[in-house]
Every structure is written in C-alpha cells, then in structure tokens.
C-alpha cells in the first residue's frame, strides 16, 4: 500500500542512504545489550519494508519483517520481539487490530504505528487503551524515526528491568515469609520445650516434696538451691540458708560425705545432727551430660526408708 499524503514529522522524507550523521540517542553501532534488540516491521508493501530494514540495519537490531498482521502474529509466536513498527491500513487485519492482538498475546512488546492515513478516532482509542505506544506518520524523517524506535527499545528494557526487580522483591518476600514461618516454628518448639522442662522441674519438685526424708539441693556453685517441705520442718537451721552458703554444721556433714563417697562410693553416713541420730546420703545431679550439683538426703534413724542408688538426672 503506497503511503498516502499526510503530516510529516520533519521537513522531508530522506532516503535511508541519506548523507550526514543521524540525530539519534545512540551511535550507528551501539554497544550490544545483554539480549539483542529485536524489531518487527509489518507493512503490506515490500518497498516500504525494504526501506525500513535498510534504515534500521545500521542500529544493529535483529530485524524481522511481515507483510500482514497475521504473518506478524505468526512471527511473534516463534520468537521474542521487543518493538513492533506496523503500518495501519493493511488488507485483512488493520494495524490497530494487529496491535491489539499483539498486546493481548505479548503484552511486554512496545508497539508503534507508522501510517500515511490518520484515522484519528481509532488511533486515539488504541493509544488510550495501551495497544499503541506511539503513532507516527508517513512520510517519515529517518533520524526522528530512528530516535523514536530507540526510545521504544529503552522503554522495553526499562520495563523488563522493573519486572525483574519486582520478581526479585516478590521472591525475597516469599523467602522472608518462609524464613519467618520457620523461625516461628523454632520459637514455638523452644517455648514448648521450655514449658515441658518447667513442667518436669515442677513435677520433680512435687515428687521431692512428698518424700519421707529431708532433701537439700546444692548447686554447682556450692549454694543451697533447694529444700523440700520435710527439710524445712525437720532441719530449719539448715533450710534457713536457702539461696546462700550451707550452714556450717551442714557444710561439715557435706565434707565428711564427700570424703566417704570418694572412698566407699555413694554409701550413706550415720551421724548425729543437732542431737538427732540420722543417716545422710549424697547423690550427684546430672543434666544433659553435665554436673548440676548434689542432692543431700537426710533420714532420721527412727524412720525406715530405702534410698535408691545412682545419680539423680
């Protein structure tokens, strides 16, 4: 289809072989981008396609050509395209119809209409709905047309980078959400473990409270850390040291017990405490493979009780 007379973008339609240095945001041989820029030219006139192909070849684009909208869609289905430059009036499918279909199927393409006919109503509608990025008229000015197409590629690459960054942010957010879920599970598990340990410790204290013998717990720092109910009732002068160093008479018994334990194992010691005959045992406390201190068990000789051997863990 011959280009009908229309409003020119510049003073003249120069030949693609025109003299002089073109006014363009890029040099004639721009640096090759990471992905080669691909331009699809669509026009039903072979002479127009040839002229456009010669014009844009100097910019280093990978150029595809089609003589109809249907052929253009077939090319789009075969390989990625960055920018589409299409005529408006073509047999079968108009340029606007082709652009709308290209936008629907390949929304990341940047689409430019180049036409000698100005069907303003349909063109304005297409531009407003986003089917067409720009509308340019024939005859064209080589430098301005190259400039507009270069801008279209920049727009395409900027949009691609924005999509890449957006996907990276979404991916990072997903990974962060997964990490937060894992952290929440770890915190929940640790909380449940702490609660279970507290429950176990409470149960152990309850069990020691009902033993028919006095129980004193000495921490690994040597402090009196625990006394059961019977200890408070029978040996108040020892129990009163809770939270501090053992009372001197208790410390003397501990020293004798430790010596006997080293000599004879964990056998009990018969002694007199405050005028009362009693038998005293020492048992090491162990938790997670490390020593936690000692349990001192005191039974009056008038009581009868079998004390289990071994460590308290």
Image (cartoon, rainbow, N blue to C red):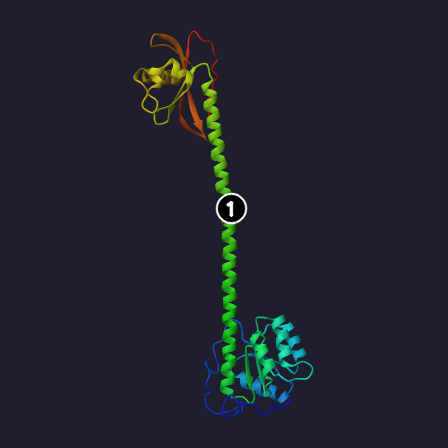
Instruction: Name which residue lies at 48% across and 33% down.
Output: 195
Vertical arrangement, residue 35 with respect to residue 279, above or below: below
Instruction: Return the x and y of residue 246 as percentages of the image width and height.
Output: 32, 20
Vertical arrangement, residue 276 with respect to residue 9, above or below: above
In this rendered view, identify the residue nearer to me: 42 or 268: 42
Q: Quadrant of residue 81?
A: bottom right
Graded by Cα atoms within 10 Å as few (under 14), some (14 to 19) or many (20 or more), the crowding at tag 1 reads: few
On the rendered structure, is 91 left or right of 164? Answer: right
Vertical arrangement, residue 190 with respect to residue 40, above or below: above
Q: Quadrant of the N terminus?
A: bottom right
On the rendered structure, is 244 left or right of 298? Answer: left
In this rendered view, identify the residue nearer to me: 211 or 100: 100
Q: How many marks?
A: 1
The extreme left residue here reads 248
Vertical arrangement, residue 24 with respect to residue 103, above or below: below
Is residue 172 visible to us here?
A: yes
Q: Quadrant of residue 5?
A: bottom right
Residue under pointer 1: 182
Instruction: Name which residue lies at 36% across and 17% down.
Output: 259
Instruction: Return the x and y of residue 238 as percentages of the image width and height.
Output: 34, 17
The extreme right residue here reads 92
Q: Quadrant of residue 266?
A: top left
Instruction: Return the x and y of residue 306 as percentages of the image width and height.
Output: 48, 13
Instruction: Return the x and y of residue 297 as percentages of the image width and height.
Output: 41, 16
Is residue 39 visible to us here?
A: no
In this rendered view, identify the residue nearer to me: 276 or 310: 276
In this rendered view, identify the residue nearer to me: 71 or 64: 71
Instruction: Name which residue lies at 47% across and 31% down.
Output: 197
Q: Secondary structure at mark 1?
A: helix
């Amino acid at each position: 289809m011959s280009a009908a007379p229309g409003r020119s973008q510049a003073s003249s339609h120069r030949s693609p072989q025109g003299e002089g240095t073109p006014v363009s945001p890029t040099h004639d041989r721009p640096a090759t981008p990471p992905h080669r820029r691909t331009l699809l030219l669509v026009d039903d006139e072979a002479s127009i396609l040839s002229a456009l192909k010669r014009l844009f070849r100097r910019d280093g684009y990978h150029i595809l050509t089609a003589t109809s909208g249907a052929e253009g869609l077939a090319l789009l289905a075969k390989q990625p395209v960055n920018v589409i430059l299409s005529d408006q009036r073509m047999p079968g499918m108009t340029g606007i119809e082709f652009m709308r279909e290209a936008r629907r199927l390949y929304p990341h393409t940047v689409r430019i209409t180049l036409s000698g006919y100005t069907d303003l109503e349909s063109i304005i509608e297409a531009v407003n709905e986003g089917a067409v990025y720009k509308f340019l008229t024939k005859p064209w000015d080589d430098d301005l047309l190259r400039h507009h197409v270069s801008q279209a590629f920049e727009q395409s690459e900027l949009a691609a980078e924005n999509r890449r960054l957006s996907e990276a942010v979404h991916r990072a957010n997903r990974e962060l959400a997964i990490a937060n879920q894992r952290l929440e599970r770890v915190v929940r598990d640790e909380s449940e473990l702490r609660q279970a340990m507290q429950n176990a410790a409470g149960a152990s204290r309850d069990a020691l409270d009902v033993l028919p013998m006095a129980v004193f717990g000495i921490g690994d720092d040597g402090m009196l850390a625990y006394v059961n109910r019977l200890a408070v009732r029978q040996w108040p002068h020892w129990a009163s040291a809770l939270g501090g160093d053992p009372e001197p008479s208790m410390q003397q018994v501990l020293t004798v017990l430790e010596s006997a334990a080293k000599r004879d194992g964990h056998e009990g010691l018969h002694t007199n405490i405050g005028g009362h005959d009693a038998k005293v045992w020492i048992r090491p406390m162990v938790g997670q493979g490390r020593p936690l201190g000692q349990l001192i068990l005191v039974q009056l000789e008038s009581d009868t009780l079998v004390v289990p051997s071994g460590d308290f863990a």
